[in-house]
Each structure stands twice: as structure tokens, then as C-alpha cells.
Amino acid sequence: MPLQIVRNDITKIECDAIVNAANSTLLGGGGVDGAIHKAAGGGLLLECMRLGGCRTGQAKITGGYNLPCKYVIHTVGPKWKGGHNGEKELLESCYRESLKLAKEYNCGSVAFPLISSGVYGYPKAPALKVAMDVISSFLLENDMLVYMVIFDKAAYQISEKLFSEIKSYIDDRYVDRHRDARLERMRAVQMSQPLYGMERVHPQAASLPTAAQKPLDLESALGTIDESFSEMLLRKIDEKGMTDSQCYKKANVDRKLFSKIRSDVHYHPSKTTAIAFAIALELSLEETKDMLMKAGFALSHSNKFDIIIEYFITNSNYNVFEINEALFAFDQSLLGA
Ligand code: APR
């Protein structure tokens, strides 16, 4: 999964580079800056002292010292002054310049904190949106594993409007697993009682082959097997006029996994991977259910993850990174692989 949102302390992330939300002196401070300097040890500060500071929106790179990473990329986010002083453009530049440095230093993986969303006061939801937009467009052109590291879940916010819309969508549909099971049991009991004067036909009876319908022998049954998940995926990519890489990047799926799926007609993906491809192909809800069924899955209203997916598809929002922001906010697993 090229872009992952994870809850962790960034100083614990083992990757090629971690990004520090520094100030223009680069001489340390509080928040994530303080945590990184503390974990890296004095060598980091000594190197930073030789860098001569850093302008807002720019980035500079040092060694990782005692941190479990090779490099630290220091970037200076904008202080929030109401949003009409170029804050968004400066914050976009922080992510862009940091990714550029990570690429220049051949980093295969990089971890970001939510820059400017702490001491610098940038509102969390817009700060997250800037981060996801810049990182996801970088990943359309580049192969890298990027972690968006959220330190405290309370500080993690998607837009109020989106959160409450999804919440009411779930509340209207979420069928409690226990209540649902009880209903099923009651229905099963009713089904077994013949109705007065009418023999209740067992629901399966209609589909059992009658004498007229000769039961299919296994040979011919197997001969009528449907197209597989990967056959449908490749057919849909062609129908949509997409390239393979456009599809798997939009699905937040890495290249290696895609080539496995492409080369194995019977490949069985995970449910989140199957849905990620349905989203990347911008399938309708019906087509999504069809594609899922070919991988052996279904969407259900006793599963919040499925209801959130249904919400985005019915609202024609196929941005897998935005969907992942919402899934993370509702403590669900993320789309992609
Ligand atoms: N790991 C990951 N994220 C963290 C950690 C950590 N150990 N500590 C804090 N954060 C998160 C905060 O929750 C916030 O969401 O990092 C985000 C950025 O917050 P700050 O660290 O306050 O950075 P910023 O808002 O960019 O302000 C920068 O603060 O620390 C000083 O020297 C720094 O002056 C600079 C200013």
C-alpha cells in the first residue's frame, strides 16, 4: 500500500527517512521536532547547526543518527494566520520539497507527521487534505512507500461535514450483528412452520432442479464457470481505457501485487484490495458487488467498512486516499495493498 495512514510515534518508524516539522532555525523545539532531536541524540543538532536554517516551505536533509532511519528531512511549515497568507501553498511546498529530497536520496520509504497542525495551528482537516493531495499526486508518478503518521488520534480530523454525513449514513444502515442474528433465527423458525392451509415452500425449493431440469454434471457445470476476478479486472481496465499503472496507483496498490494478479487468472485478492480496484475503476455499486462476488466477497450492512465504501460509491467519490482518510477516522482498515 504506497500511502498508509498509521497511528504511531514517528521516532519509532523504521523507514529510509522521517520528516521533521521544524522551525526556521532548525535548532530543535517542541512537538515532533523535540521528539526527533531527543531520539536522534546530540549528533543531529550538531549537523543542523551547520545548515544555516531553513525557509518556510523549504526542506533540508541530515543523517538519522540514533533514529531507526537513514535520514531526517527537516521542513518548516507555515504558521496559520487565518488561511489568506499563502499558508496552503507553503504547506504544499513542504510536502513536495521533502518528497523531492527523499527521491534524490533514493529513499524507498518516508514518514511524515501532520506538518503545521500542532504549534503552528493549521486546522487539522485541511492540513490532512493538503498532505494527502500532494503525496497522492507524487505517488501517481513515483514508486515510494509513504507513511502519514498520526500521533494522537484525537488530533486527527477529517472535515466535520464529511464525518457527520458518513456517521448518519452508517446509523441509517448499520445492522447490529446480534440483532441481525436474532432476526435470522426468528425467520428460520417461521420458515419451518407450514402456514395454515398452505404448505410453505422452502426458499431453496425454487432453485432445486426439477425432473424437467436435468441436474448439471460436474463437467458441464465447470464448463460454464464465470470470468474470474482478475479477468474482470483486466477487462474493466481495457473498457475504461486505463493503463495498468494508472489503475493500480489509483487503487493504492503496489506494482508487485498487481503483476501477481495480472499473471494469475485465479488470483484471490483480499476484500480491501478488491474494493480498492473497484474504486479505482469507478464502478457502480452493482458492478462493485459483481466484482467482489468474483473474489468471494459481498458488501454487508453489518460491517461499517462496507457501509462507508457504499457511501462513497453512491456519492460518486472515487478518491481512494479521501476514502482512506474517512476509514481511518472510523477506525476501519484502509483500502489498497
Ligand atoms: N510523532 C508523530 N507526530 C507527532 C509527534 C510524534 N512523536 N509529536 C507530535 N506530533 C504531531 C502533532 O500531534 C501534530 O499533529 O505532529 C504534528 C505537528 O505538530 P508540531 O510538532 O507542533 O509541529 P508544527 O505544528 O509544524 O509546529 C512547528 O513546533 O515543535 C515546534 O520547533 C517546532 O517551532 C516549530 C513548531
Image (tube, rainbow, N blue to C red):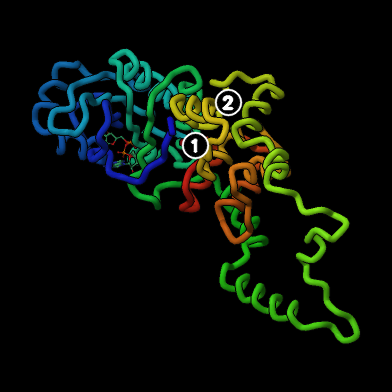
The CA span between labels 1 and 2 is: 11 Å
First in sequence, mark 1 or 2: give its number: 2
The amino acid type found where label 2 is placed reads Cys
Which of the pair 228/167 is nearer the observer? 228
The extreme bottom residue here reads 196
| Residue 85 in view | no
Q: Quadrant of ligand 1?
A: top left
Neighbour class for label 1 at 10 Å: few (<14), some, many (≥20)?
A: many
* 174 relative position to 101: left or right: right
| Residue 13 in view | yes
Q: Residue 333 at what x, y percent from top left?
A: 47, 48
Which of the pair 268/248 is nearer the observer? 268
Q: Is residue 243 above or below residue 129?
A: above
* 48 relative position to 21: left or right: left
Q: Is residue 183 above or below residue 258?
A: below
Q: Which element carries disc 1, helix, strand or loop?
A: loop
Name the residue tied to disc 2. Answer: 247
Which of the pair 221/284 is nearer the observer? 221
Which of the pair 224/80 is nearer the observer? 224
The amino acid type found where label 1 is placed reads Gly
Q: How many marks?
A: 2
- Which label belongs to residue 336? 1
Neighbour class for label 2 at 10 Å: few (<14), some, many (≥20)?
A: many
The extreme right residue here reads 197
Q: Residue 329 at what x, y percent from top left?
A: 48, 49
Mark 2 lies within 8 Å of ligand 1 (Cβ measured): no
* 183 relative position to 215: left or right: left
